């Protein structure tokens, strides 16, 4: 079976979707011919290029980029994508972003006779702010739902994504396939390990409260800063570490200064992927204060690492975490602060929940099982 994957970015660009696609398709590439059509990275954007990564043929198309604070990531316009689609002549075309593919792209897929699968990595946005909420709904009404109508199969990464995003008449071709986690890489480690000690020295003395996420309003880091400021009133031995990139970097720096916590707060945007597991190991608690979260790769990474978790009870988070962490209401800085303190002080409960979280990842988020589910779906419609 020949599979053509469409997504604006691919490894070494490392967002959540890109991590998912690398893990999924390095497995399927062992049994099928897989190519990815993606945008050229901004640093090398003058011509198309081709390379092989983990058995996957990756074609990066010459692209123009739109950079604006409205979008959480740069938005590429991929030149020649329709010709590339027709040239591949695949059995399955797998779209992973419904915001960047339009009628000409779908018509090109249709002309090949290949089947179209769309995975919804994002739900219809809700309760972020009126501009994003209304804009997301308007887009789906005007175009996003038309892509779903054209698809032969729709996958949601949580039931919440399917229930909130797929129109009722299309539910018959929708299914849920969770994202996975490499729990051999993200795992508990001896706190005395050299790399962990080095991170602790880098961050400075104190118990590390960790957040890993893109720096956008959706991820709720502004409320985390306020919560951390409250938590410091009870525990002066805390350090807040946020790992991520995004347009809120300057805002969060200024907010930390306003709250008087700059000596207890650090942001990192250049953590190497191979070092990321050790940051979860160094943390005493991981906090995901999202306002809207269809699913979170960082949450899976924290759970697999046996790091105690505090997370907003929104979107797909309860499906992923179940009863293995502490829940808070979105925007509730006081509740977040109280849960951080509780996670640090009730160590026995935290350790029990963390071990349950690890077992949950091994049972429900194994990448080999998830790759098999996609393969079964593709064979069914191809």
Image: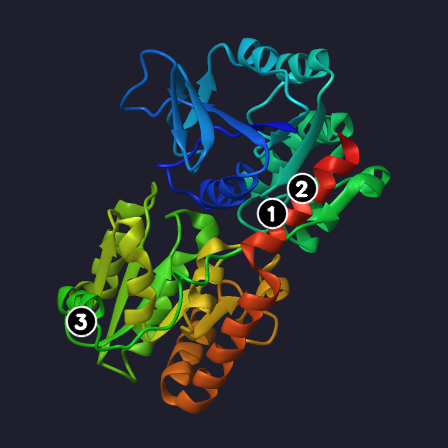
Is residue 57 visible in the rendered structure shown here? yes
How far apart marks 3 and 1 lie (CA) works out to: 35 Å
Q: Are marks 1 and 2 in contact (CB under 8 Å)?
A: yes
| Rendered residue at 42%/84% (across/down) | 342
In the rendered view, tell whether residue 324 sits above or below residue 133.
below
According to the picture, the residue beneath numbered tag 2 turns out to be 375
Query: Which secondary structure lies at badge 2?
Result: helix
* Mark 1 Cα shell of 10 Å, populated few (<14), some (14-19), many (≥20): many
Is residue 295 visible in the rendered structure shown here? no
* Mark 3 Cα shell of 10 Å, populated few (<14), some (14-19), many (≥20): few
Task: From the image, state whether disc 3 or disc 2 is nearer to you.
Answer: 2
- Give the numbered dot on residue 329: none
Towards the viewer: 114 or 74: 114
* Residue with the most extreme front position: 31
Query: Which secondary structure lies at badge 1?
Result: helix
The number of callouts visible is 3
How far apart marks 3 and 2 lie (CA) works out to: 41 Å
| Rendered residue at 59%/22% (across/down) | 101
| Residue 293 placement: quadrant | bottom right
According to the picture, the residue beneath numbered tag 1 turns out to be 371
Name the quadrant of the C terminus.
Answer: top right
| Rendered residue at 29%/64% (across/down) | 278
In the rendered view, tell whether residue 30 sits above or below residue 318.
above
| Residue 174 placement: quadrant | top right
| Rendered residue at 15%/75% (across/down) | 205
Residue 99 location (% of width, % of height):
57, 29
According to the picture, the residue beneath numbered tag 3 turns out to be 197
N-terminal label among 3 and 2: 3
Towards the viewer: 95 or 257: 95
């Amino acid at each position: 079976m020949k599979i053509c994957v469409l997504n604006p970015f691919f490894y070494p660009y490392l967002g959540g979707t890109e991590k998912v696609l690398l893990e999924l398709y390095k497995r399927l590439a062992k049994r099928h011919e897989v190519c990815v059509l993606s945008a050229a990275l901004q640093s090398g954007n003058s011509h198309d290029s081709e390379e092989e990564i983990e058995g996957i043929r990756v074609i990066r198309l010459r692209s123009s980029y739109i950079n604006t604070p409205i979008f959480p990531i740069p938005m590429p316009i991929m030149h020649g994508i329709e010709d590339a689609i027709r040239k591949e002549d695949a059995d399955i075309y797998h779209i992973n972003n419904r915001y960047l593919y339009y009628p000409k792209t779908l018509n090109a897929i249709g002309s090949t006779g290949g089947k179209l699968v769309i995975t919804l990595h994002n739900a219809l946005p809700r309760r972020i702010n009126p501009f994003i909420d209304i804009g997301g709904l308007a887009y789906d009404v005007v175009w996003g739902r038309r892509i779903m109508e054209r698809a032969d199969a729709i996958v949601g990464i949580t039931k919440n994504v399917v229930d909130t995003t797929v129109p009722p008449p299309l539910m018959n071709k929708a299914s849920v396939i969770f994202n996975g986690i490499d729990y051999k890489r993200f795992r508990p480690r001896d706190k005395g390990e050299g790399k962990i000690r080095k991170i602790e020295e880098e961050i400075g003395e104190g118990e590390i409260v960790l957040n890993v996420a893109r720096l956008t309003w959706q991820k709720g880091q502004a409320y985390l800063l306020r919560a951390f400021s409250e938590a410091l009133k009870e525990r002066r031995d805390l350090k807040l570490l946020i790992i991520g990139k995004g347009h809120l970097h300057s805002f969060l720096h200024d907010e930390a200064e306003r709250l008087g916590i700059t000596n207890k707060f650090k942001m990192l945007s250049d953590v190497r992927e191979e070092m990321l597991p050790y940051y979860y190991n160094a943390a005493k608690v991981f906090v995901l204060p999202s306002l809207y979260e269809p699913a979170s790769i960082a949450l899976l990474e924290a759970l697999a690492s046996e790091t105690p978790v505090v997370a907003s009870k929104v979107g797909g988070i309860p499906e992923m975490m179940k009863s293995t962490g502490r829940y808070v209401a979105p925007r509730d800085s006081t509740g977040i602060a109280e849960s951080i303190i509780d996670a640090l002080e009730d160590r026995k409960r935290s350790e029990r929940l963390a071990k349950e979280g690890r077992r949950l990842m091994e049972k429900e988020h194994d990448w080999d099982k998830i790759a098999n589910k996609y393969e079964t779906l593709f064979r069914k419609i191809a």
